[in-house]
């Protein structure tokens, strides 16, 4: 089956890839565009490690064909922060030990970012319910929830910069 | 896990999608949110040669409440249903159910049309649609027809929808009766071990003037419990009538042993869940 040119805006940059219809977005991001922040944890739509933000929605990129994302705006962990300038969520995950092996972290933070955009003042229960699509095998979630709550607090300070 | 090869189509109008589906015939499948179909394609349980993506058809995405009737376009997502103030007013049971489906990511993508058309006994919307006495609008090469949700489900993955028809809209009367969707599951995001949708209306005299009960994942189709409803309508809602309604509903289910537990356990869970749903629905009057 022939390949189609897929145009995307990823983390603010226009990019192109060639893909067969059956190629999943996660594979195109990781293997063609070298965007390796989103991880493959299960590839069966369960773990959320592959979560990216597409047009303002948290999406499991292993459950979308790249061709379906044609023309969309995608944000991955790479677009939220970098080692020189961490996103508030990244800082708080670091500070509160919101990660151990770190495999789930890019998906977790990308999801938490959307959650806080939609609900800037979440309760602990809102956070737990809001990240229910992201599995973590290490932390027991306690410190992840703490980190997201702390990030919300910080983002709600009047002088906060995201 | 990479699905088999297929050709991708993205029609922009419903007539174009219907025409494409009739041209391509049984080699084609429509794709909505993809959150049941793509997992099945990865497992090669589905191997369509053509996928007709409905995502560009704007007319399939709407929520309208008018003249006592709710209409929801098939491509409306669970997240959009949860966020709809109009639906919260006119059928609060829909939001309560949607919030118990899968997880946030799945709800951003999964559509109500896909959920009811899929025919998987694990899907939560079919029983709810039977409870609401919804009907489904189907558009095919020979025109449009409506099928009642209570007549739609034939067996697991078999429905009254013809292969060449597209489900376009879901219609049901505004429902402000006491409501509950109660779901027993192993973990958040899981399909039901047992779930019950219940609507109960209370008249001025305290009697039960409306009753609808349907069950999820306890047989190979959703189960509409007509006799249980009749019992509550006849005798009112009290400890004895609830017990006999639950008993009659339990006579209709046929759960099977699987990784959610043995059939005996599911029967037990179903009885607990149904009683709980009846209590909550009645208390919300
Ligand atoms: C991790 C996970 C957990 C889940 N948990 C639950 C749960 O707890 N409860 C639940 O109910 N669901 C659950 N689901 C399924 C999810 O809700 C799906 O989104 C839903 O079943 C199908 O909707 P869809 O829009 O994704 O449809 P698709 O996957 O695109 O389609 C499903 C089927 O319906 C057909 N179809 C779709 N739209 C139409 C249409 N308009 N006309 C005709 N045919 C159509 C397709 O051809 C396909 O056969 C879960 C899914 C995942 C991945
Ligand atoms: S890799 Fe996509 S959900 Fe696990
Ligand atoms: S930190 Fe290891 S999976 Fe979450």
Image (tube, coloured by chain):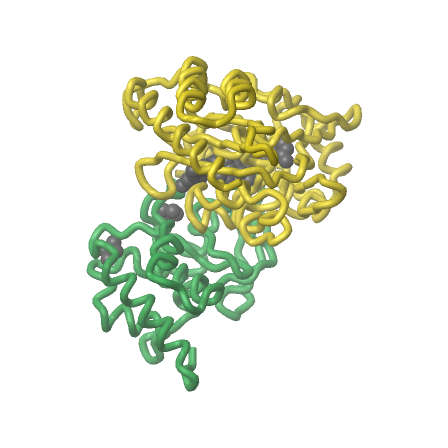
Chain colours: A green, B yellow
Left or right of A76 on screen, residue B28? right
Q: Residue at x 29, y 72 (%)?
A: A92
* In the rendered image, the vertical position of residue A85 relative to residue B46, given as above or below: below
Nearer to us in this view, A32 or B34: B34
* B30 displayed left or right of A161: right
- Image position of A20 with respect to A78: above or below: above
Q: Is residue B103 above or below residue A83?
A: above
**At x 70% / y 46%, what residue is drawn?**
B64
Q: Position of residue B51 (x, y in %)?
A: 60, 36
Residue drawn at the location 55% of the way across and 19% of the way down: B234
Residue A160 percent across, percent down from the top left: 41, 82
Q: Image height check: is B111 above or below B123?
A: below
Residue, far top: B251
Asked which quadrant contains residue A88, the reply is bottom left
Q: Which residue lies furthest to the front in this view?
A: B205
Pinpoint residue A56: horizontal percent, then vertical percent.
Answer: 53, 61
Report the residue that reaches farthest toward the right. Answer: B143
The single residue placed furthest to the bottom in the displayed view is: A159
- Left or right, A101 with respect to B58, comes to left
Residue A103 image position (x, y, % from top left): 27, 56
The answer to whether residue A33 of the structure is visible from this angle is yes
Q: Where in the image, quadrant-wise, is ligand 3 located?
A: bottom left
Q: Can residue B2 be seen in this view?
A: no
The quadrant the C terminus of chain A occupies is: bottom left
Q: In which quarter of the image is the N terminus of chain A?
A: top right
Residue at left offset 27%, top offset 68%: A93
* Numbered circles on residues, count: 0
Using residue B153 as the reference point, say whether residue B272 is left or right of it: left
């Amino acid at each position: 089956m022939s390949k189609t040119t897929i145009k995307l805006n990823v983390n603010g940059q226009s990019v192109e890839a060639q893909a067969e219809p059956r190629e999943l977005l996660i594979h195109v991001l990781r293997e063609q565009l070298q965007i390796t922040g989103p991880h493959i944890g299960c590839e069966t739509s369960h773990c959320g490690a592959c979560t990216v933000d597409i047009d303002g929605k948290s999406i499991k990129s292993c459950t979308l064909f790249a061709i379906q994302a044609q023309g969309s705006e995608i944000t991955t962990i790479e677009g939220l922060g970098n080692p020189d300038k961490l996103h508030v969520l990244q800082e708080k995950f670091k500070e509160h030990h919101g990660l151990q092996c770190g495999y789930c972290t890019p998906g977790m933070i990308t999801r938490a970012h959307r959650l806080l955009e939609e609900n800037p003042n979440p309760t602990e229960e809102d956070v737990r319910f809001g990240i229910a699509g992201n599995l973590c095998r290490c932390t027991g979630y306690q410190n992840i929830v703490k980190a997201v709550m702390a990030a919300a607090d910080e983002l709600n300070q009047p002088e906060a910069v995201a | 896990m990479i699905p088999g090869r297929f050709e991708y189509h993205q029609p922009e109008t419903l007539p174009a999608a219907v025409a494409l589906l009739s041209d391509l015939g049984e080699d084609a499948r429509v794709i909505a949110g993809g959150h049941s179909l793509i997992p099945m394609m990865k497992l090669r349980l589905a191997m369509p040669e053509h996928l007709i993506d409905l995502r560009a058809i704007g007319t399939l995405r709407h929520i309208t409440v008018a003249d006592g009737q709710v209409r929801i376009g098939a491509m409306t997502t669970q997240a959009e249903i949860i966020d709809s103030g109009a639906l919260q007013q006119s059928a609060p049971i829909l939001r309560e159910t949607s919030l118990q489906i899968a997880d946030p990511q799945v709800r951003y993508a999964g559509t109500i049309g896909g959920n009811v058309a899929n025919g998987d006994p694990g899907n939560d919307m079919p029983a709810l649609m039977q409870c609401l006495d919804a009907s489904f609008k189907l558009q095919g090469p020979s025109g449009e027809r409506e099928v009642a949700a209570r007549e739609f489900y034939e067996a697991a993955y078999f429905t009254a929808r013809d292969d060449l028809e597209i489900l376009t809209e879901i219609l049901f009367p505004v429902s402000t009766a006491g409501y509950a969707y109660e779901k027993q599951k192993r973990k958040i995001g899981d399909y039901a071990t047992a779930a019950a949708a219940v609507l109960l209306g209370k008249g001025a005299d305290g009697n039960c003037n409306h009753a609808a009960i349907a069950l999820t994942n306890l047989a190979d189709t959703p189960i509409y419990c007509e006799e249980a409803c009749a019992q509550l309508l006849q005798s009112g809602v009290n400890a004895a009538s609830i017990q006999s309604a639950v008993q009659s509903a339990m006579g209709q289910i046929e759960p099977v042993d699987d990784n959610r537990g043995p059939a005996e356990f599911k029967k037990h869970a179903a009885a607990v869940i149904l009683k709980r749903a009846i209590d909550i629905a009645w208390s919300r009057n």
